[in-house]
Image: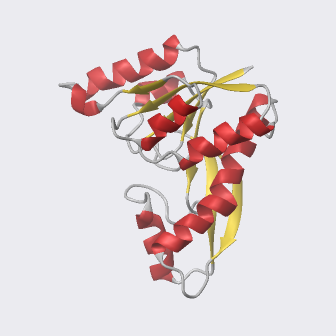
Amino acid sequence: MLRICVLVSGGGTNLQAIIDAIESGKITDTEIACVISNNKGAYALERAKNAGIEALCISPKDYDQRSDFNKALIEKIDEHNIDLVVLAGFLVVIPPEMIKKYERRIINVHPSLIPSFCGTGYYGLKVHEAALKRGVKVSGATVHFVDEGTDTGPIILQKAVEVLPDDTPEVLQRRIMEQAEWELLPAAIDMIAHGKV
């Protein structure tokens, strides 16, 4: 049984996709051991509670030093005997010591086809604004392992999504979530659970 911890900062739509995929059997041999957010008001925490999953807030704002937050985050993940950490819209830099400790055991979903529109500063709507400004005809999403860089780890899965002429960043964001992110993240987790990555 693959024990996962999902790290979230906002609404938790990717978390919901994982919960739904486990319930429907798209993901097997996997359980969400806990959900951790850096944001007390994140709706993702409500989604976790509604699904009977332990939901915790560990925020850098609650610690005097970043190193204390890093330590608390790693300790909480260790406590739950986690096999895989899933970043699902987590807007906090992952501590280097955690990346080292959980090498090839942290994955992230990014709303573009890496290496396009990724790296420092590319998150949320900013990714889609940049894609539209550049005039790309195809965007999409990528699930990748997390390493010390920003969006630089080995790619697991990618899916392309068409960009339409009248797209706004919000419309494109929604289409990429629905057509790519919500499919790729559960698929990658299931592949990892069955040793296919």
Which scheme is used to colour this image of the protein? secondary structure
Q: Tell me if residue 197 can be seen.
A: no
- Which residue is farthest front? 50
Q: Quadrant of residue 32?
A: top right
Q: Is residue 191 left or right of residue 92?
A: right
Q: Nearer the viewer, residue 154 or 157?
A: 157
Quarter of the rendering occupied by the N terminus: top right
Q: Residue at x 44, y 59 (%)?
A: 124
Foreground of the two, 181 or 40: 40
Give residue 117's position: percent from left, percent from top.
Answer: 50, 65
Name the residue rendered at 53%, 66% in the picture: 173
Residue 176's spot in the image, x, y percent?
A: 61, 64
**Quadrant the C terminus occupies:** top right
Height in image: 178 above or below 39? below
Relative to residue 120, is residue 29 drawn left or right? right
> Percent x, y for residue 26?
80, 40
Q: Does residue 132 appear left or right of residue 183 in this picture?
A: left
How many marks do you count on the picture?
0
Is residue 100 visible in the rendered image? The answer is yes
Q: Is residue 145 above or below residue 28?
A: below
Tell me residue 34's x, y (percent): 54, 24
Residue at left offset 30%, top offset 25%: 69
Q: Is residue 171 above or below residue 54?
A: below
**Where is 193 relative to 110, above or below?**
above
Q: Is residue 161 left or right of residue 58?
A: right
Q: Residue furthest bottom?
A: 165
Q: For residue 70, what is the image quadrant? A: top left
